[in-house]
Image: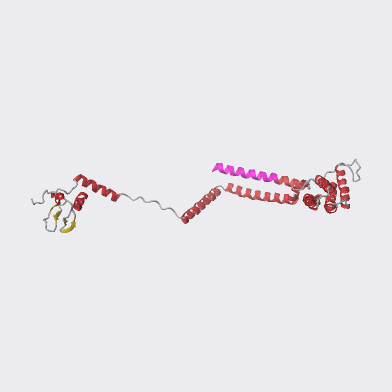
């Protein structure tokens, strides 16, 4: 064995001033420091049978004959190889790609269309239930629309906000006399006139539709409010005006009629009351009640049919 066998080269080259060469597959590699040889031997990149030499003039020797090279044992080599293989073969877990805005929109539209299709198929699966539903809705809309037209024609919305004529006239007349006696300013009088007109005009509009020869109280109240009360708001500011005198006369006659007296204030006559604007026509009331009954019956029939269809499904 040559002089290199089993020598401690770390003692010979403590600062690694000498280069080493490696012979692998008849090809020379290097130069490298001895620390690099140790690293290659530890990592398994340099085998026992590989040839190495010191410097350019040294002899080629087996790497396994050099004492300071830390070759791993067989078990360590196999463990390192297995670990390297496991790292290389470890599956890469890819995160699922999040759908974009357009994909979400298309998916949402598709889901809605499928839900609509399922609903139509379910509805058509029961022909009787479908026919019942369609007819019920048509009848419901027709009856509700007819009832709305009738009520709007015979019971205008303005009438719902109109107060009692006798009470309203009394309040306005008493307040007029109070303002006149207290010498109200022009601003106070203007505010009073505006408020009074807003209260009287709906009553006059209602009485113009309902007053007739058969309803003498409403007729007297119409004349008192339309012909005299609205006028005396303008000409009775300082003193009693002719409009106020005529209003008092017509208003008193309306009061007498409600008390069972005649237009002269004599008793013994039939008591009159102003006709209710809710039932100004008997037939209107009858038709209104009939519409409500039919409407309720159709709704009950519709709900009963839907409940039966649900229980069957």
Residue nearest the viewer, comparing 67 with 199: 67
242 over 303 or under it: above or below: below
Q: Percent position (x, y) of residue 152? A: 73, 51
Q: Is the magenta stretch mostly helix, strand or loop?
A: helix
Residue nearest the viewer, comparing 305 with 32: 32
Furthest residue in direction front, as rendered? 15
Q: Does the magenta stretch include residue 310?
A: yes
In this figure, which colouring scheme has been used for the structure?
Answer: secondary structure
Residue nearest the viewer, comparing 107 with 79: 79
Residue at 19 percent across and 50 percent down: it is 38
Q: Give the range drawn in magenta.
A: 292-313
Quadrant of the drawing holding the C terminus: top right
Tell me if 102 is positioned left or right of 307 in this view. Answer: left
Q: Percent position (x, y) of residue 247? A: 86, 49
Q: Is residue 293 magenta?
A: yes
The answer to whether residue 310 shows anywhere in this view is: yes
Furthest residue in direction top, as rendered? 268
Q: Percent position (x, y) of residue 13? A: 15, 52
Quadrant of res 170:
top right
């Amino acid at each position: 064995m040559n002089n290199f066998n089993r020598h401690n080269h770390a003692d010979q080259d403590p600062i690694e001033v000498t280069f080493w060469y490696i012979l692998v597959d008849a090809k020379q590699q290097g130069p490298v420091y001895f620390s690099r040889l140790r690293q290659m031997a530890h990592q398994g990149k340099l085998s026992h049978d590989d040839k190495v030499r010191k410097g350019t003039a040294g002899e080629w020797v087996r790497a396994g004959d050099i004492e300071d090279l830390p070759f791993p044992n067989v078990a360590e080599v196999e463990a390192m190889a297995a670990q390297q293989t496991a790292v290389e073969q470890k599956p890469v877990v890819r995160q699922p790609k999040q759908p974009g805005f357009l994909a979400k929109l298309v998916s949402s539209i598709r889901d809605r269309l499928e839900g609509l299709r399922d609903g139509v198929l379910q509805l058509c699966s029961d022909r009787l239930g479908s026919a019942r539903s369609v007819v019920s809705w048509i009848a419901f809309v027709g009856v509700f629309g007819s009832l709305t037209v009738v009520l709007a024609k015979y019971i205008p919305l303005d009438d719902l906000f109109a107060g009692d004529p006798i009470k309203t006239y009394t309040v306005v007349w008493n307040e007029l006399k109070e303002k006149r006696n207290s010498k109200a300013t022009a601003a106070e009088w203007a505010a009073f006139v505006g408020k009074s007109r807003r209260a009287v005009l709906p009553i006059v509009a209602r009485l113009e539709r309902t007053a007739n020869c058969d309803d003498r109280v409403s007729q007297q109240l119409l004349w008192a409010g339309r012909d005299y009360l609205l006028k005396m708001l303008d000409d009775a500011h300082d003193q009693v005006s002719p409009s106020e005198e005529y209003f008092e006369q017509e208003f008193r006659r309306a009061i007498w009629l409600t008390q069972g007296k005649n237009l002269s204030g004599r008793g013994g006559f039939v008591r009159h009351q102003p006709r209710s604007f809710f039932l100004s026509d008997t037939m209107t009331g009858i038709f209104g009640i009939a519409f409500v009954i039919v409407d309720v019956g159709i709704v009950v029939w519709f709900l009963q049919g839907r409940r039966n269809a649900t229980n069957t499904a």
